[in-house]
Amino acid sequence: MSAQGRRLLVVDPSEVDDDLVWDVTEILTSLCARLSGRRAAANRAAKAIAVATGENP
């Protein structure tokens, strides 16, 4: 997050426990998987278009 100039702000420090860490980890995992899936789908589509038009993929 810091590489993109972002930060995580904890409003109530007493709530920082394993559940919060688990939730944040799950959210980040989900977002990364979604982004990776979009990229893979875009690559497959580009390859299919290249094959259909006779270009070299």
Image (tube, rainbow, N blue to C red):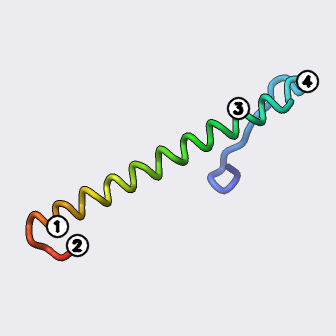
- SS label for mark 3: helix
Do callouts 4 and 2 mark residues in contact (Cβ within 8 Å)? Answer: no
The residue singled out by tag 1 in the image is 50
Three-letter amino acid code at disc 3? Asp
Three-letter amino acid code at disc 4? Ser
Disc 4/disc 1 C-alpha distance (Å): 55 Å
Three-letter amino acid code at disc 2? Pro
Horizontal side of 28 relative to 8 (left or right) equals: left
> Within the image, what quadrant is residue 52 found in?
bottom left
The first of marks 4 and 2 along the sequence is 4
The residue singled out by tag 2 in the image is 57
Residue positioned 79% across, 28% down in the render: 19
Disc 4/disc 2 C-alpha distance (Å): 54 Å
User: Residue 7 versus residue 52: which sits nearer the camera?
Assistant: 52
The residue singled out by tag 3 in the image is 23
The first of marks 3 and 4 along the sequence is 4
